[in-house]
Amino acid sequence: MARTVIDVDDKMLAFAQQQLGTTTKRDTINRALTIAAAISADDRARALRWLQENAEYYLDFDVLDERERAGL
């Protein structure tokens, strides 16, 4: 794990600790990073599901096949 020196807003840190149920700066920041990463992964998963369900309405598969055969 890397050691990093940063300036943190003390009021925002206290609020985050209250919301996350953490007691140390390290735990609070690591929990917030974990949540942020999970949200991002969830967003990507939702977007992929949407694309899979709706691809036929937005993608022209004949054109994509031609481009793939042409090596483009």
Image (cartoon, grey):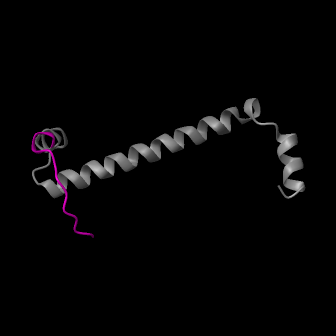
Residue 30, horizontal then vertical, whole percent: 25, 55
**Residue lying at 85% horizontally and 58% vertically, measured from the top left:** 71
36 relative to 60 in the view: left or right:
left
User: Residue 66 versus residue 53: which sits nearer the camera?
Assistant: 66
Image: 36 above or below 71: above
Residue 32, horizontal then vertical, whole percent: 26, 48
**Residue lying at 76% horizontally and 33% vertically, measured from the top left:** 56
37 relative to 56 in the view: left or right:
left
3 relative to 67 in the view: left or right:
left
Does the magenta portion include 46? no
**Residue lying at 61% horizontally and 35% vertically, measured from the top left:** 50
Quadrant of the image containing the N terminus: bottom left
Residue 46, horizontal then vertical, whole percent: 53, 38
Magenta stretch bounds: 1-12
The outermost residue toward the front is 7
Q: Quadrant of residue 26?
A: bottom left
Does the magenta portion include 3? yes
User: Residue 14 versus residue 54: which sits nearer the camera?
Assistant: 14
The outermost residue toward the top is 57
